[in-house]
Image (cartoon, grey):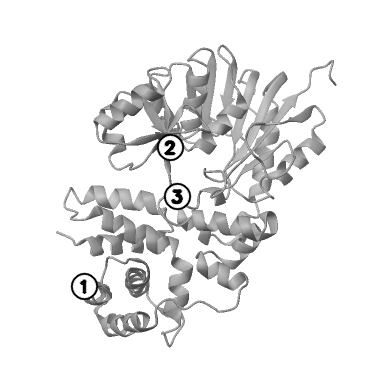
Amino acid sequence: MKSPRQLAYETLLKIEKDKAYSNLVLDSLLSDANGNVRDSAFVSAVVYGVTERLVTLDYTLALYLKEPLSKLKPQVLTVLRMGAYQILYMDRVPDSAAVNESVVLAKINCRYASSLVNAVLRSVVRNGLKLPEEDGLKRISLEYSCPEWLADMLIQSYGEDAARKMLASFIGKPRTFIRVNTLKTDVASLAGELEAEGIKTLECEIVPEALEVLDAAGLNKTRAYAKGLFHVEDISSQLCCGALAAQPGETVMDMCASPGGKSFTIAQMMENRGALYSFDKTENRVSLIKNGSERLGIHIINAGVNDACVHNSGLPAADRVLCDVPCSGFGVMGRKPEIKYKSKDELDNLPSIQYCILRTCSEYVKPGGRLVYSTCTLCERENREVCEKFLSENAGFVPERVLPDIPRRDNTDFITLLPGISGSDGFFIAAFKRLTEEEN
């Protein structure tokens, strides 16, 4: 039986080598362990903790290495990061145990480096966390374990105070919200049913049909989940559906829909009446929408494969169209911390793809209908600038103010939900009305 540290090591090594998402790799490895994990909470804490604190851990380790970290083999670097994380951030793990167990881990996976691991980690124990004394971008980067260019982007866009609050919110366990399936139950009934199964919840003031789950462990194994009484969805995403404001009996499109959370919420807002087309690019992703719809008892969703960048003449005109476009994901770094470590160059092509999707989706909107553009990023190039370009090049659309009751940072019609400030993931929402012939 593998130890919790060995499982954490294997997970982190796979994330490092494959550039995979931590949550997906961790779920897979824990599942493959067939119930032999003694302490899955410890494994999860180490995996997410190391991934969240990567910048700070590497800075600390580099202080005690004679060669650059890039010269270390991934096996050695992974053991060092795990040990340093336990020493610096896990109060319940004695320093001696963190060092000794890391040496054991090294002997199993990279024996040649066990002496190096021992020496470096003992230096970390002696000196603790040492950050630059002077304030500035480098210190902010290390405090919140965020690449300097990304911290600078947030500061330039939102100011240092807001940027610090957002970066702080990305560290630690993210909040979990669920959407009550109003086709089958109500908030009070679901809260009572979940409590009877040992799951405690809180009502959500921002979205009345949502509940915050205080401890989500085992949530998808509850009877309430099996009966389709809810689906997991952050309130930012639920607010986005509110901005679309789909009505019963309408024709609605969700153009980048997988895994389906927004489609499910929209269908409930439509009272399961009308037609809701939910698309994604691959059959595997579409199957997630179909399976979720079946569990929740939703019948109006027509899920299928479609490329949102290419006009499909076979689709009907719609009263409302949602394009929640692929994006850099900087608003959900608390759930997927590895997003922080994307290179800046990876983002260069995103705005053109996003604009292509927005422009193509606009062709399906009926005169007088609504088009909603959304992302889960905080990058203005992907948000405001894409929308401003769309308005400048498409005179048949005008902006509509979304979610007027939600506090916003400026007086524009668009809204950016800021993590650590709005109480949700980071999210951008913009709405446009297609003018009728009379209005044109």
The amino acid sitting under disc 1 is Ile
Can residue 17 be seen here? The reply is no
Give how far apart the Cα atoms at labels 2 and 1 are: 40 Å
**Residue beneath the point at 40% across and 20% down:** 186
Mark 2 / mark 1, whichever is N-terminal: 1
**Residue beneath the point at 77% across and 42% down:** 389
Task: Report helix, strand or loop for mark 1.
Answer: helix
Give how far apart the Cα atoms at labels 3 and 1 are: 31 Å
Q: Nearer the viewer, residue 219 or 294?
A: 219
Q: Are dots 3 and 1 in contact, CB under 8 Å?
A: no
Residue matched to label 2: 177
Q: Nearer the viewer, residue 19 or 130?
A: 130
Q: Residues within 10 Å of mark 2 (few under 14, many from 20)?
A: many
Which label lies toward us, 3 or 1?
3
Which label lies toward us, 2 or 3?
2
**Residue 406 picture quarter:** top right
The amino acid sitting under disc 2 is Phe
Q: Which mark is residue 108?
A: 1
User: Which quadrant is home to the N terminus?
Assistant: bottom left
Can residue 380 be seen here? The reply is yes
Give how far apart the Cα atoms at labels 2 and 3 are: 13 Å
Q: Residue furthest left?
A: 1
Mark 2 / mark 3, whichever is N-terminal: 2
Q: Is residue 222 above or below residue 381?
A: above
The amino acid sitting under disc 3 is Arg
Residue matched to label 3: 335
User: In the visual, does 187 lie left or right of 341?
Assistant: left
Mark 3 / mark 1, whichever is N-terminal: 1
